[in-house]
Image (spheres, rainbow, N blue to C red):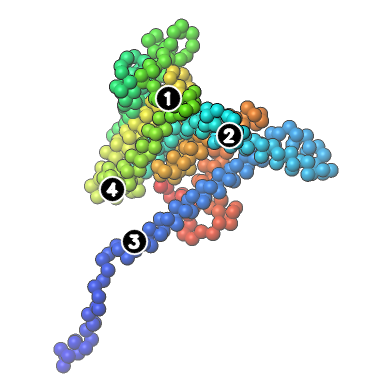
Amino acid sequence: MTGSTDQATEAPPPTQPPAPPGRGDEPARAGGRWTQLWRSIVTAALSVLLAMFIGGLLIAATDQDTRNSLGYFFAAPGDTFYNGWWAASEAYSWLLKGAILDPATLSGGSPSQVFGSISETLVYATPVILTGLSVALAFRTGLFNIGAQGQMIFGVIFAGWVGFKLHLPFVIHLPLALLAGMLGGALYGGLVGVLKARTGAHEVITTIMLNYVAVSFLLFLLGVHGFQAPPFNQSKSLAVDDSAGLPRLFELFAPGLRANVGFILVLIAAMLVWWLLERSTIGFRLRAVGANPAASRTAGISAERAYVVAMTLAGLLAGLAGAVQLLGPAREITGTIDNGAGFDGITAALLGRGKPAGVVAAGLLFGALRAGGQRMASETGTPIDIVVVVQALTVLFIAAPALVQSIFRVKTSGGLGAEQAKGW
C-alpha cells in the first residue's frame, strides 16, 4: 500500500530535457546590450546638442549687435532674438566649414582647399584619440590615468631623440622612432603602476605630479645644447630627419595638407585595444580587476600585476600619441608640443564611455571642434574659448544622463543614470 502511494504521488518525468543553462537568456541579454548601446548613443547626441545650444547662447551674448539691441529690447524684442540667432548660426556655420567641408570650395577650388578642413580635423583628433584610448584602458582596470600628458611628453622626448640624433634609412628610422616614443610613454606609465602595486600610492596623485615632472624636464632639455636647435635663442629642439617623418595622407592629390598616416595608426591602435579588452585573457583580467579587485584576488587574479600592465599599456598609447604628434605635423619639439591632447583625452574617454569605438568618435568630434573653432574665430571674431565651453558642457551632460533625459523627456527603463554613475 505504501509503495503504491509513493508511485501515485511521484512527479511524472519531464517530456523533454531542460535547456542547457545560459542558452535561453542569451537573446535577451544581447537585446539588453543593444538597448543600452542605443540609449548611450542617444544620450551622447542629446548632450552634444544641449552643449551647443548653451554655447550658442554664449555666442549671442558676446555679439556686439545683440548686446546693442538689448538697449531697446522692450520696444523691439525681435531685433535681439534675430541678432542673437544670426550670430550663433553664422558662428556654427563657419565651425562646420572649418571642421568638415566648405561648400564654396567644391566649385573651382583646388583639392587642397576641398580637403583642407577634414585634414585639420584629423590632425587635431589623432593625438586626442590615442590619449583617450590610454585613459579608457586604465578606466577599464579601475584606474584614473590623469598622466597622459606626462606620458605623451616622454614619448615625444624619446621619439625626438631617435628622430634627430640617428640618421637611418626610412624603413628603419620611422619604425624605430615610433617604438622609442611608445617605450618612453610605457616606462613613464609603468612607473605609476609599480607605485600603485607596491606602495598603494593613488594613481591620481602620482600621475598629476609626474605631469609636472615631465613638463619641467622637457623645458630643461629645450635649453641643453645637443637637444636645443641653434642659434640657441629660443626653446625648440632640433628638427627630426625626413626619414623619421610620417608620410602625409593626401600628398598625392592635395600636397601641403598636414594629415598623415598617424591617423591610420590610431585606427589600428583602437582595434587592438578593443581586441585586448574584449577578446584576450589579459583584457579579461584587467576588466575583472576593474570590476572588483577583491573578487579578482579570490579568483587567483593578481590585482597588483593588472595595475602594472594596465598603466604600462596606457603609457605606451600616450607615448605613441607623442611620437605621432612630433613625427607628423610638428617635426620640432616645443614646450607646448602636447597641445592639450593629454587632458582632451580624458574628456574623450569620458564621452566615449571607455569604449574604443566611442573614444574614436569623441576624438573626431573634439578634433572637429578644434579645427572648426580656429576657422570660426578667424571669420567671425567669436572667441575660440566657446569651443572649450562646448567640450566641457558635453562631458558634464554625459556624466549626468538623467538630467539630459529629463530635459528632453526621454523615456527609459532600468535607469541609465545609475549605470553611468557606477562606472564602466
**Crowd around label 2: few <14 · some 14–19 · many ≥20 (10 Å):** few
Instruction: Give residue 65's position: percent from left, percent from top.
Output: 75, 34
- Looking at the image, is mark 2 or mark 1 earlier in the sequence? 2
Instruction: Give residue 256's position: percent from left, percent from top.
Output: 49, 23
Identify the residue shown where x is 26% and y is 66%.
20
Amino acid found under the numbered disc labelled 4: Ser
Q: Which residue is mark 3?
A: 26
Choose top left, top right, bottom left or bottom right for residue 105.
top right
127 sits to left or right of 75: left
* Element type at mark 1: helix
* Element type at mark 2: helix
Name of the residue lying farthest toward the front: 108
Instruction: Give residue 53's position: percent from left, percent from top.
Output: 62, 43
Do labels 4 and 3 touch, CB within 8 Å? no
Amino acid found under the numbered disc labelled 1: Gly
Can you tell which mark lies on residue 357? none
Q: Which residue is mark 4?
A: 296
> Which of the image's four quarters has the N terminus?
bottom left
- Looking at the image, is mark 4 or mark 1 earlier in the sequence? 4
Q: Nearer the viewer, mark 4 or mark 1?
A: 1
* Element type at mark 3: helix
Q: Which residue is mark 2?
A: 106
Residue 312 vs residue 128, the one in the foreground: 128
Residue 249 vs residue 21, the one in the foreground: 249
Q: Nearer the viewer, mark 4 or mark 3?
A: 3
Amino acid found under the numbered disc labelled 3: Glu
Q: Nearer the viewer, mark 4 or mark 2?
A: 2
Above or below, 36 relative to 271: below
**Crowd around label 1: few <14 · some 14–19 · many ≥20 (10 Å):** many
